[in-house]
Every structure is written in C-alpha cells, then in structure tokens.
Image (tube, rainbow, N blue to C red):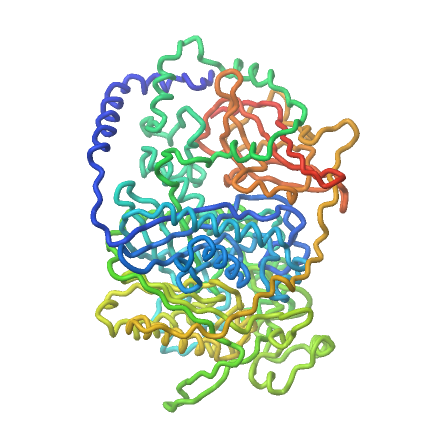
Amino acid sequence: MEFHTFCDLNVWRVCGKMRIWTVLLLFLLLKSDVNVVYCGSDYLVGLGSYDITGPAADVNLMGYAKTEQLASGIHFRLRSRAFIVAASKGNRVVFVNLDACMASQIVTIKVIERLKARYGDLYTENNVVISATHTHSGPGGYLQYFVYIITSYGFVRQSFDVIVDGIEKSVVQAHENLRPGSIFVDKGELLDAGVNRSPSAYLNNPASERSKYKYDVDKEMTLLKFVDDEWGPVGSFNWFATHATSMGHKNSLISGDNKGAASRFMEDWFERKDSGRMDSDILGNDGSPQRISNIIPGLRDNQVGKQEEFDACHIHILISICLCPKSHLKSYHELLELAVSFQSPPGRPTTKTSSVTKRVRGAPRNVDKPRFVAAFCQPNSGDVSPNVLGAFCLDTGLPCHFNHSTCGGRNELCYSQGPGYPDEFESTRIIGERQFKKAVDLFNAADEEIKGEVDFRHTYIDLSKLEVTISDQGADKVVKTCPAAMGFASAAGTTDGPGSFDFKQGDNKGNPFWKLVRNLVKTITRKQIDCQHPKPILLDTGEMNVPYEWAPSILPIQILRVGQFVILCIPGEISTMAGRRLRDAVKTILSSHKDFENVHIVITSLSNAYSQYATTYEEYYVQRYEGGSTLYGPHTLSAYIQEFKKLAKALISGQPVKPGPLPPNLLNKQVSLLPPVVVDGTPFGVNFGDVYSDVPQNSAFKSGDIVSASFWSACPRNDLMTEGTFALVEFLQGKDTWVPAYDDDDFCLRFKWSRRFKLSPMSKATIEWRIPQGVTHGVYRISHFGAAKGLFGSINHFTGSSSAFVVVA
C-alpha cells in the first residue's frame, strides 16, 4: 500500500470541485465587504486570554496539600480568560477565570493596582472579579496567608508574578477588543460529570428541603454566549459544578484538569468550525476534538463514510496542491527515505522568543478578529467530585465506609474513581469532553438575549466576628461567626485526595494525640471551642500570627449584574445545598423588582480571595471534610446569605454600599524557602538540546501510537516560556521546511522534566506525543526548547530536535 502526502488522491478529488468553491468564496468575500452591520447593541463586549503557566519544576502543585507533589513538566498550559461587558452609556464589569486552584487576595490587590495605574478608576475592586477553575495541578505559592503556602515552602514569587501578569494582559486584551455586541444565555442538564462526594453530610439537610431537588448535586450548566455585531461569536463562559480533581495527587504535570481541558477543546472546536469545518465533525474516533492547526497545511482525513472537506482558510494552499505535478506524490518508502535524511542535529543556541514564534496557537488566523475564548467556571461545587464511578478501597475493591470514607478505619486507601480509571489523564479528557459537548449544545441553542443595565456591588466583611441574625424556632436570634479554625476532618482530605495519618471524615471529637500536638502549637481558648462547636479544632489558624497571619479574616463579597444575569462572587468553596440556599435568598430579594422577573443567578466560587468552605448548618454538624474546612463556624453560610441580601437590596434600590474594612497587604512579609536554580550543566562534550534518547531509526507510527524523545535539558524555572512552548511536534513541508503542528498546550503532547538525581545540575526533558486520530500523514520530528542558567547567572536559550519519523494515517 502507498501513502501519499500533500498531493494524495483525496486532494485530487477536491480539485474537481475547486471552481465552484472558489466562486463561492469570492462571492462571500465580496459580500462581507458591504454587509458589515452594527445592530445598535446595548453593550460593548470584549474578551481576552493569556498564558499563566507557572514554574514546571520543583514547585508544589496547589490543592492536595502534599509536599511531595512537585511540578515536573506540563500536561497542557494554564490560562487567564476574561470578559468585559460595558453598557453603551454607563457601567462596565470585568470577569476573569483562571486555570488555577483558587483566587488569591494578594493577587487581586496587585492586579487592581496595575489596572488603576493603567486605566484610572475604570476598573477597580468594585467591578472586577477574579475567579478560578480549582485545578489541583497548578503551581502554588501565590497566596498571602501562611497556611496556604506551607506545602510550597513559602511564597513563590515566580508563581505569583506569572498569574498577576497574565490576568492583567487578559484584561488589557479584553479592553482593547471592546466592540458592539450581544450576549445570549442558555442552560441545560449534564448528568454524568459530577457526583456528591459527601452524601452523608448532604443527607443531614432537612428531608423537606432535599425533596425539592432531583439530585444531590446541581446538574445544570448555565452558559453565556458573546457575539460581536460584525465578527459573530467571540466567546462563551459557562458555570457547571464539578471539582477539577480528575488529576490525582500523584500527578506531577501542570494541568488545567477537566475544566481547562474543556476550555482547550471548545476553543479548538470553534477555530475548526470558524474555519469552515462541519459541526458534525467535532470529535475524532478517540473522542478527542480534532484540531486543524492554523499553521500546518494539507487536508485531514475525516471519519469513515464522510465526504472529504477542506479548511476554507487554506484555499490558497489547496490551489497550489492541486497544481502540483504528479511526480511529487510520495510513497511510504519515499517518505521513509526522506525521514532518514533528517538525523537528530546537535543542540544549538536560539533566541528567547523562538519558542513563542514556533507555538501553534500564535497570532489569530484573522488578525482583525481575536481568538475565541471559552471559560468553564466553578459554581457551588464544594461537595461535587468528577470521579463519577464512586469511592472504593484500593486493597479490597469494596466501597469505602459511607460516613467516614475509610478502609479498615483509615482514610489513605479510599479513593474515588473517574470514568477513565485507572488512567487519570483519560478521566480528565472524558469529564472535560462531557462539559465541552454540553457547552457546545448550549452555545448553538442560546437564543435568550441578555438585556438591561450593567451594575455591581462589592464590600469587605470581617468573617471572624460578624453578627448574624438567624431565625430560631420562629424568633430572631443574633449569633456570631468565629475566628478561622480548621477541624480534624480537614486533615482527612476527601475521596478525591485522601489525607495522611489517622484523620478521618465525619469526626466531631478529635484524636487525643493530635490534640496534644495541637496544643504545643497553640492552646485553644474555651470561647473559640464553643464558637466552633461541634468542630474539634486542629489548627486555630485565625488566631495564629507568626510569622504573619495564617488565615484571612476580612474577605470580599460581590455581585455583578448584566441585564437579567447575576453573578454572586464567593471567596471560597460552597457546597451544593449551601449554594442553593444562597441563590434562593438572593433571588427572593431580586424578584421583587420588575427588572429581575426572569433573573438567572449563578454562583462563582473561589473569587478574589480564598477562605476554604461554606456548608449548611446541618452539614457542618456532620463534620465531613467540607464541614471541617468551614473556617468561621456553623453560621458561616448564614453570614454570607445575610450580607449578600444586603448587596442585592442595594443593587435594586440603586444605593451604594459601604466598602467595609480593608484586607491586609502581606506581600512584603512573605517568606520563601524554595532554593533558587544555581546552575545547569551537561556531561563533557554534550550540548544543551542534544538528544538523550532518540526515536527509533527508520520508524513509522500511526494514530494511537506514542512517540517519545528525550533531550539534555535545563531547569524549566529559568524561563517559563510564557505564550511559548517547551515541546513541539513539527511537520515536514516540502523537502526542508519544518512547520509547527502540536505544542505543549495540546492535550496529546506531554512535556516531562527530571534531574539525574536530587540536586543534580544535569537534567533531561522527555516529550511524549500520543498521535491523535485524523493526523496528516507525512514526516515529523519532535523538538525541545529550554533555557540554561550559567555559572554566573546568565540565561542561555537552546533548542534541539529528534530524528525524523513517518506517521501514516
């Protein structure tokens, strides 16, 4: 059998249709010049996105609190995604969603400082929200309170800076992209992407309340679709509750987890759709979205039985292909001969910007139109797991204990299983794909237009001592929240990532040994014990101030309004039922006003700061992980509801709210114990970028195969390759031109880094390419970009490439 490259038989079939397609294309181009219509929109809409991938080596991944979980490569990159909506005459709001574990108060403070320096009072803490997807596979060390940076050995300036820079740049992009546009909303059920990981706590809520709901987690996705009056759709943001914990605590690759994967899939899907491909061709045979690169030329084979299609934006390439002489057709053996002629060259110096210019998703295909932005945001997912198969004991295979999530009395062997178990990468893909496919359905169907004012309310509250009025058997009663404290159950972890030692969920007594250890750190006052009851306190973080504050007291809450769409912004995680109560309370207030008769309310958790969890009063009493991590006592949710109702009333009355007490800025107090990169090295006679382990000689691969190559490398902390790449798969065009095909922002490519031994200056980078379905057959190679630190601190960029190999379709 012969395998042809650019001038294969499918292309010759396309040539017969070229005249018709060319005429149609010219007609559309001419038509587009005279049919630019502005619809007199009520809003200006702008979206932006920027790389926030942090240090891919040595830094603790934030989320599971495992000191041994250190970054050592990249699964795919992390991004900051932003939208701005401005009323044509009046207010504007900014919403940012990060591929990060949570927002950080000090990050928010610094971003607002930068935006004020750039735009004055146009963007302030009042109308800017910074939220997060809650991936547990992003570098930590960027929060300001001590308890959240212990596992990262203190503050990591590099993590902090890249996030602040990326947020600012994504907002600047969105601001510069502001143009007349419309917004549409739709919602629908997604049934197989989340389960309740603490059902025993949920069942402690009143039966009358539970009976109102079909499920013990929220199954509804709500999506906003942003449409530019001239360009058409430019983005979508959606809210669906499921933890970004498909990747477990043994993973060491930076990853956006299922939420980030869904964003990557949808953005690539739209680029494919926008370039002229059919909606029905969303997914490849392996279930992964097939991407048509905006750089690599040629046709992709479609799924079996489909008529060949082509990328309209590459029509000039197809014309040249159709004119190529038949003598240019290459058989498999000719391809192999060509590949053999490209042996791995020595590593060589390169420029700092070379990895940026080589990245696949570089400048937009249409320079006048920004890239499509798709964000998958996190609402009330505090008790929702993406590991939908349930929790089982690793030793017996039996379900874990229902109340305590233990196996034989211990938590360490109780793990929940994702749909791709035991492959967590596959689970990430599946849960990401399920969210992506539902988002596409809603995106295509969205027809309810958002209309009305743009407005916002923001205040700070001191949750360590807030008076809250609650109803107690029909009478009002004033209670208070407590200084922050973590319970014993918080150390037990969850079924997504169990803790260590003999802590367990559902513990409202505590362990005598750990109480003794606790008291050596700080003795708990009777007042605090009573306030937090029935939580047994493990760490009294709200009253610990050495070397500086361990936990926040002053926190932001915020409401954004765009027409009939309202976003409640919570500085932490909130359980399913707690979120339902909060939404209902705010809706009751808003619905009394004619502008909010058909209001859509979503919660955005992990916003602007981080303060762990908020559960219902009844869930708190069970003291599962979420209850043990509800810092401010049993009345935390009631406090949030009380204060959000105040914001809602101010919103409908048009009255301002007091700013409240300002949170501290602890940036100058931060401590960092992470050792710097001292120097990188290679063996005598070896260059940085030289191949350490090459692809097999005279090799050919097909879809589904894994191709890998290793290179002598240097620590990725020397240069984060922001908006660039450490890894690249290149395609041979013609006889000597290599063009980028896949990079380290692709789900199919993994960049892995390791030292020869601990503290060694010598390291290697391994790049693995899982060849996707529909790949263009031809000659490929794997390339690596890096930056080495010299003995006197200089940073020297380098690159290297593997020998070439053949991929057959």
Horizontal relation, residue 685 to residue 137: left or right = right
* Picture residue at 52% right of the left edge, 23% below the top: 738
Q: Is residue 198 left or right of residue 696?
A: left
Residue positioned 67% across, 30% down in the render: 689
- Position of residue 759 measured from the top left corner of the image (x, y, whole percent): 76, 46
Locate residue 604: give its quadrant: bottom left
Q: Position of residue 41 (x, y in %)?
A: 23, 51
Task: Report the front residue among 725 and 210.
Answer: 725
Percent position of residue 671, x then y: 68, 61
**Left or right placement of residue 248 versus residue 512 in this view:** left
Q: Nearer the viewer, residue 445 or 401?
A: 445
Picture quadrant of residue 721:
top right
Q: Where 22 falls versus 545 (above or below)?
A: above
Q: Quadrant of residue 593?
A: bottom left
Q: Is residue 66 above or below residue 314?
A: below
Specify whether residue 222 is in view.
Answer: yes
Q: Give the image location of residue 663, x and y in percent.
A: 53, 70
Q: Residue at x 67, y 49 (%)?
A: 58
Say whether residue 538 is visible.
no
